[in-house]
Image: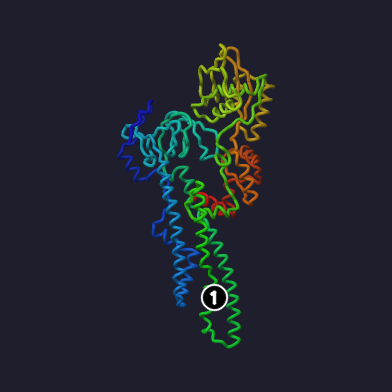
Amino acid sequence: MCAAQPEGSSQKIAGLSSEEAKRRLSEYGYNEVEERRRSVFLTVAKKFWGITPWMLEVTIALTWLLHKYVDTYVVAGLLLFNAALSLFEERRADSAVTALKQRLHIQARVKRDGEWVSLPAREVVPGDVIRLRAGDVVPADVKIVEGKLDADQSALTGESLTVSKTVDDSVYSGTIVKRGEVTCIVTATGAKTYFGRTVELVQLAKPKLHMEEVTASVVRWLLLMVALLLALGLGVSYARGVNLAQILPLTVVLLVSAIPVALPSMFNISMAVGSLELSRKGVLVTRLSASEDAATMNVLCADKTGTLTKNRLSIAEIISLNGFKEDEVAIFGALASNEADKDPIDLAFLSYVKQTSNSLGEHKILEFTPFDPTTRMTQALVSLGGDEFRVYKGAVEAVLELCHSPPSERSEVERRVQTLTEKGYRVLAVARGAEGVGYTLAGIAALSDELREDSPRLVNELSELGVSVKMLTGDALPVAQEVARKLNLTGPVEKMSALRSRGDENEYAQIVEGFHSM
């Protein structure tokens, strides 16, 4: 346990005592979503329960009654082999997942007994006072009591842009702090957090195994054929006056022959080989049938942000105004940016300038003011060749107000902004000028979350294979529609509530569970 002493008035905010924290830990439990783990006995017993094991168990009973002990031992061996192979693969995957979780273990700065200490995030309890700064992953649902920050909530909402949070605002577990420093009080931990409830929904999914459906279908058809043959044989025997008791052993043999005892073993072996091949490519399979579930899917639900896109803003278009050039607009926007803040909009302008002009030339930043939620702009005082001027970057309305743009220019800019917004772009304005002289609107820039280079190709390949791709996002509708257009995704837009009311919800649950296991 290492001490950490943040500066500021946060020292006045009292934290929990060690005794109170221990009491709350026993009341609320650890700050983690408890995995639904079965006991070893139930895990082993489950391998002998289901359509496939029942089929083999019936075969064992019938061959034993017919005194075909060799067949009994062979089928029993197959049953044990199936169970052992499945258990071995899943245990190996569990060990890998456990090791991975230990490596991803995070710490939290917590105030205990009046001192700031660093504790494992799982030991945080409701009521704890914690300190968050740039780069931290929020360990629990918290309420800000001091300071302000910009948070990346893309893992929860799909929104690529950061969200500003200040006193009395809530910040959810799993959010990443991009800028700022705050003192917070923990309001919820573990499964009670916003993120924890989402994880529990995935754990509740109980998909049907495709392998068992195929096996059951094969067995049904074989039993139907055998039943027809038995009916025909019994009818002929009865017509000839043969004692039916004499052909009972033959009847049992025919029933046993209808059970494909080696089929489950072949399925398990093929899935084990598939899991091994996937592991060589860096894919961790935690459930033996997960790869088979993924291979037989007909609908792929893919998250937009970070999966289909890079979760990184980039400049898609620049419109220069009032005699300025596009590269000048980009440079002004980059000058009003600070790479150290890791703000996605700032990084987009800086990256664009590096890719186009490679540098900011002889511009020298004398003073930089980060984004202010009240003005909705960032600004910088710049020196070039002995002359000083200011550059502004921010919301279009705020920059237009700063420049005192005439009605004609304002209406033209608003028309262009509306067009870009309908395409799903985030639009910012850039201005240049000096105090006492006035400011001139240099241009507007359209930003978007850039697609991954391989996304269009993969979506097209999946479509050719007959897999329907559905994009999941909590982003604004125009943004989602523009990404769908670029990916050539067609079909209606559906809300989650509508999906829950549909009869094929289980189809989607199977997909979620299948990929959750990989």
Q: Residue 240, how many percent across, how many down? A: 60, 87
Q: Residue 198, how many percent across, how many down? A: 49, 46
Residue 201 visible to an observer of this rendering: no
Asked which quadrant contains residue 143, the reply is: top left
Above or below, comparing residue 43 to residue 76 in the picture: above
Above or below, comparing residue 40 to residue 419 in the picture: below
Of all residues shown, which one is farthest toward the left? 19
Above or below, comparing residue 334 to residue 488 in the picture: above
Q: Which residue lies under the disc numbered 1? A: 254
Q: Say which of 270 and 1 sits in front.
A: 270
Residue 309 visible to an observer of this rendering: yes
Left or right of 241? Residue 193 is: left
Q: Residue at x 61, y 17 (%)?
A: 439
SS at mark 1? helix
Q: Residue 341, how many percent across, how many down? A: 49, 27
Q: Residues within 10 Å of mark 1 (few under 14, many from 20)?
A: some
Left or right of 415? Residue 296 is: left
Of all residues shown, which one is farthest toward the bottom? 241
Task: Name the quadrant of the N terminus.
Answer: top left
Amino acid type, label 1: Leu
